[in-house]
Amino acid sequence: MRILLTGVNGQVGSALKPLLRSLGTVQAPPREELDLVDARAVAAWVRQYRPHLIVNAAAYTAVDRAEQEQAAAFALNAQLPELLGSLQREWGGAVIHYSTDYVFDGTHEGAYTEKDITAPLGVYGRSKRAGEEGLMSSGVPALIFRTSWVYGLHGRNFLRTMLRLGQERAEIQVVNDQWGAPTWAGSIAQGTMAVCATLCSSAQAENSLVDGLTGKEGIYHLTNGGATTWYDFTRRIFELRPECRALVLPIPSGDYPSPVRRPVNSRLDNTKLKEVFGVRLPLWSEALEDCLAELPDVQEVLTS
Ligand SMILES: NC(=O)c1ccc[n+]([C@@H]2O[C@H](COP(=O)([O-])OP(=O)(O)OC[C@H]3O[C@@H](n4cnc5c(N)ncnc54)[C@H](OP(=O)(O)O)[C@@H]3O)[C@@H](O)[C@H]2O)c1
């Protein structure tokens, strides 16, 4: 199977690359080789390589900056997924794409299911929702995995920021009134692979994944299990890494002003993923331990 992976240097893309190799030949051009906002270049690339599967882990993820850079956010998060869908539809390939809890406004009680109505609070969320709609309307066989609060040992993310601040500062204030599931990029990659394994299990042919997808297309919530707040997440990080000695103080979201409101409730119900594919990701607390086990020296985050 030929696979095109986008966003290979991002959190999810870098976790996916080594795992996807077990499914086939992976092409993963970085931004310097393929600028994904260049629609002509993308079309030429896909038509030449004809990937059976495109795994689109690329995104515009600067939530606050997106308020000023609407066109850039929509180019990558909305227009690209639709383009990839149309190109794959041309010749019979499939797409796996990622989306976000930010398609919701967070006012719902309990965990959101895939059937709940979306109501993004900002440009980033609107662009990601437009991407979901564009990809689905292209008519390509596609899976869209909505995830939340992604972290890992690579890239800019909450975990790395806290590991750094925990060593540099005496005290830090962390928001304690937003609920969600911190999700390790490694778990997202493993969950994606587990889904692919069920899709490929019925046949060995190159197009078996596409065939296996029939009837299962659509949106799935894919997060680590359980829920917490950013404050309790930070406390757990510091318990696991006692080198982080900063005192952690809880604050309400209102005390941490930002250009765009975040959903107060980001919890995503993963039942559909379990029912359709038999896949369930580990609890957020277990995934955090697994992730930190891959960081031998916590001082690394100060220098890298
Ligand atoms: N981060 C979160 O907290 C979060 C939460 C919920 C859902 N998600 C979703 O999860 C998915 C993966 O997110 P992530 O956190 O792994 O994102 P990320 O770390 O920000 O990585 C995004 C990747 O997209 C690439 N990219 C951006 N613009 C590009 C362009 N014009 N041409 C080529 N490549 C480009 C980046 O390339 P460079 O390396 O060159 O910059 C980077 O490799 C996304 O769909 C995101 O919306 C993320």
Image: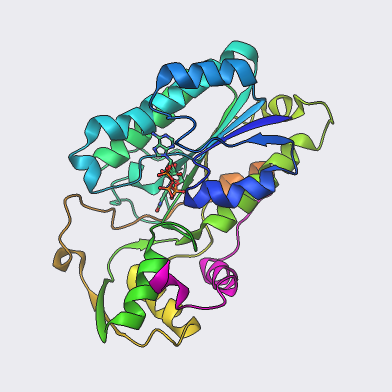
* Residue 31 in the figure: left or right of residue 5: left
| Magenta stretch bounds | 278-304
Instruction: Give the residue at x 63% y 21%.
Output: 49
- Applied colour scheme: rainbow
Asked whether residue 293 is drawn in magenta, I would say yes
- Could you say where residue 157 lies in the image, as x and y percent from the top left? 39, 60
Up-down: is 158 above or below 192? below
| Snapshot quadrant of residue 267 | bottom left
| Extreme-top residue of the structure | 90
Res 274 seen here:
no
| Quadrant housing the N terminus | top right
Q: Is residue 2 visible to the viewer in this orientation of the structure? A: yes
- Quadrant where the image shows the C terminus: bottom left
- In front here: 204 or 116? 204
Q: Quadrant of ligand 1?
A: top left
Residue 143 sits in which quadrant? top right
235 left or right of 18 in image? left
Q: Residue at x 54, y 46 (%)?
A: 13
In the rendered image, residue 249 lying in the magenta stretch gets the answer: no
- Residue 156: x and y in percent read 38, 58
Against 206, is 246 above or below? below
Residue that appears at 19% across and 41% down: 67
Residue 211 image-quadrant placement: top right
Give coordinates of residue 80: x percent, y percent: 42, 26
Query: Which one is in front, 99 or 34?
Result: 34
Q: Is residue 262 left or right of residue 11?
A: left
Q: Residue at horizontal 66%, vertical 49%?
A: 18
